[in-house]
Amino acid sequence: MSAAPQLQDERERIYSLLTSDTVNTPNHKWLACMIASWCVGRGALPDYLGLEPAQFNAVTARFQGCPIPRQAVSGQQLDFSRMLEKDDLVKLLQQFAATQSADTDIIIAIIVAGCLGSDHLWQDLGLWSRAQLSAMLQYNFPALAAKNDKDMKWKKFLYKQLCEMEGLYLCRAPSCDVCIDYPNCYGKES
């Protein structure tokens, strides 16, 4: 058996442990997906899932049936000092949050940490599909998700929102529809 199916099986086993309790909120399930992936070295989330230690402890307290390591199995050590836009991303997501809660703050922190990765946001977060990321964003940030009416790739979309908030338009094309990079922003993610 190759490593990929074994990792997939282990990820699914961990997910089952994480979701075996009675909490069945959508965020609980998405967190379980991200944690299960993170535990097998998938995704780009760093130590503590990119959370502050107190947030990480709150997350692990929810999932007592499964021990969650503090350090990323992948060895990812993301450097937030190179992310000058971290505070802006947090503010953007907070501005569009459906609710203001500790749960929302955790989701925001994990999304921001995922933005430091080099793959599609859903992959960097350790979600299992782009559809999961879309559903998570629609659930937690419905007005922001609704603005992505042309299905732009999520990481690009978030950064485009930051640029527009600052009145910056870095693309030379008069609109996305005529841009030669259109497939890079809106193409199928795999």
Image (tube, grey):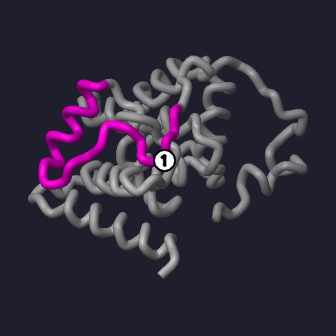
Q: Is residue 100 magenta?
A: no
Specify the principal SS of the magenta part: loop
Q: Is residue 28 left or right of residue 181?
A: left
Image location (x, y in percent) of residue 123: 54, 54
Q: Residue at x 40, y 26 (%)?
A: 94
Image location (x, y in percent) of residue 114: 51, 40
Bounds of the magenta segment: 53-77
Examine the rendered structure and indicate whether residue 121 appears above or below residue 130: above
Q: Residue at x 56, y 43 (%)?
A: 147
- Residue density around tag 1, few if under 14, some if 14–19, many if 20 or more, within 10 Å: some
Q: Is residue 155 left or right of residue 137?
A: right
Residue 98 visible in this rendered orientation of the protein: no
Q: Which residue is mark 1?
A: 74
Q: Residue at x 28, y 62 (%)?
A: 15
Query: In the image shown, does 60 or 180 lie closer to the viewer?
Result: 60
Examine the rendered structure and indicate whether residue 7 appears above or below residue 125: below
Q: Is residue 67 magenta?
A: yes
Image location (x, y in percent) of residue 17: 20, 62
Q: Is residue 109 left or right of residue 124?
A: left
Query: In the image shown, does 113 or 92 lie closer to the viewer?
Result: 113
